[in-house]
Image: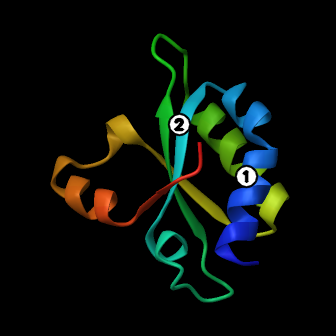
Amino acid sequence: MTRDEIVAAIRRNADAIKAKGVAKLAILGAHARDDYRPDSEIDLLVEVEPETDFSLLNLIDVEDIIEDATGLQAQATVRRSAAPHSAQQIADDMLEVF
């Protein structure tokens, strides 16, 4: 699956992902750089709607939605949980999906 196909598959499921409390979603790392192996997982960064009860279960639901849509393993991180020292690397390797 190409990067563009992954982005399209995620966008087709945006309503279901947003229903879990996600305001913004981006692809990180190898898939964002379009430099990945066929078995590479999709690294994701999600930004949560303010004042939303967002739990680990919601995050797992988001990963499951994306895995079902793409057939690839997904690993999501909530933006507010990302380590401050990795902010520049995240910014350099980020492709916003919605």
Q: Residue furthest left?
A: 85
- Decide: is 96 above or below 23: below
Q: Quadrant of the C terminus?
A: top right
Q: Is 59 in front, or is 18?
A: 18
Residue 46 is marked as none
Instruction: Give coordinates of residue 73: x percent, y percent.
Output: 68, 67
Tell whether 41 sits left or right of 64.
left
State the image quarter where residue 70 is shown.
bottom right
Instruction: Give coordinates of residue 31: x percent, y percent.
Output: 55, 73
Image point (55%, 44%), residue name: 25
Q: CA distance from mark 1 to mark 2?
A: 12 Å
| Circles 1 and 2 in contact, beta carbons < 8 Å | no
Q: Residue furthest top?
A: 51
- Decide: is 35 above or below 90: below
Image point (77%, 32%), residue name: 15
Q: Earlier in the sequence, mark 1 or mark 2?
A: 1
Image point (45%, 15%), residue name: 50
- Decide: is 11 above or below 18: below
**Residue that numbered label 1 is attached to:** 10
Query: Helix, strand or loop at disc 2?
Result: strand
Residue 24 is marked as 2
Q: Is 78 in front, or is 23?
A: 23
Instruction: Give coordinates of residue 58: x percent, y percent.
Output: 64, 32
Q: Quadrant of the N terminus?
A: bottom right
Amino acid identity at mark 2: Lys
- Answer few, some or many: residues within 10 Å of disc 1's Cα (few below 14, many 20 plus, some between 14 and 19): many
Q: Is 4 in front, or is 13?
A: 4
Image point (69%, 69%), residue name: 4
Amino acid identity at mark 1: Ile
Query: Helix, strand or loop at disc 1?
Result: helix
